């Protein structure tokens, strides 16, 4: 579960940094701050977090493809 945790924490951190920067730049309406931060951090994470996203995807695929033990 480690790659999933790392990716999730990095996404949250990126969202908070984006929100902080937008607040410093003068966006003070809370609704628009959240909406714009969500959109900007999503685009930035698509570029910056591709390695972490691939690791998370690989880990989840391995977990889902593993056969479950049977109780016969």
Image (cartoon, rainbow, N blue to C red):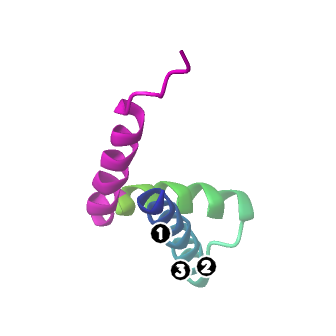
- Residue at 28% of width from left, 52% of height from top? 54
- Between 52 and 32, the one lying in front of the other is 52
Tell me the residue that label 1 is attached to. Answer: 10
- Between 67 and 1, the one lying in front of the other is 67
- Between 19 and 70, the one lying in front of the other is 70
Q: Give coordinates of residue 5: x percent, y percent.
A: 51, 62
Q: Give coordinates of residue 28: x percent, y percent.
A: 69, 72
Determine whether label 3 and label 1 are within 8 Å by CB.
Answer: no
Tell me the residue that label 2 is attached to. Answer: 26
- Residue at 44% of width from left, 55% of height from top? 42
Circle 1 crowding by C-alpha within 10 Å: few under 14, some 14–19, many from 20: some
View extreme (front): residue: 72
Give the magenta-colored segment's residue range. 46-72
Please determine whether, in this image, residue 21 is positioned above or below residue 12: below
Please determine whether, in this image, residue 18 is positioned above or below residue 50: below
Precedes in sequence: disc 2 or disc 1: 1
**Left or right of residue 59, residue 50 in this image:** left
Q: Main secondary structure of the magenta part?
A: helix
Whole-angstrom CA distance, mark 2 to mark 1, is 24 Å
Q: Give coordinates of residue 34: x percent, y percent.
A: 64, 60
- Residue at 59% of width from left, 84% of height from top? 24
Tell me the residue that label 3 is attached to. Answer: 21
Q: Secondary structure at mark 2?
A: loop
Please determine whether, in this image, residue 21 is positioned above or below residue 40: below
């Amino acid at each position: 579960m480690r790659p999933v945790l790392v990716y999730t924490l990095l996404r949250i951190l990126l969202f908070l940094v984006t929100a902080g920067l937008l607040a410093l730049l003068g966006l003070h309406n809370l609704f628009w701050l959240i909406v714009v931060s969500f959109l900007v951090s999503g685009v930035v994470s698509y570029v910056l977090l591709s390695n972490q996203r691939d690791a998370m995807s690989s880990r989840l695929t391995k977990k889902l493809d593993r056969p479950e033990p049977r109780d016969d």
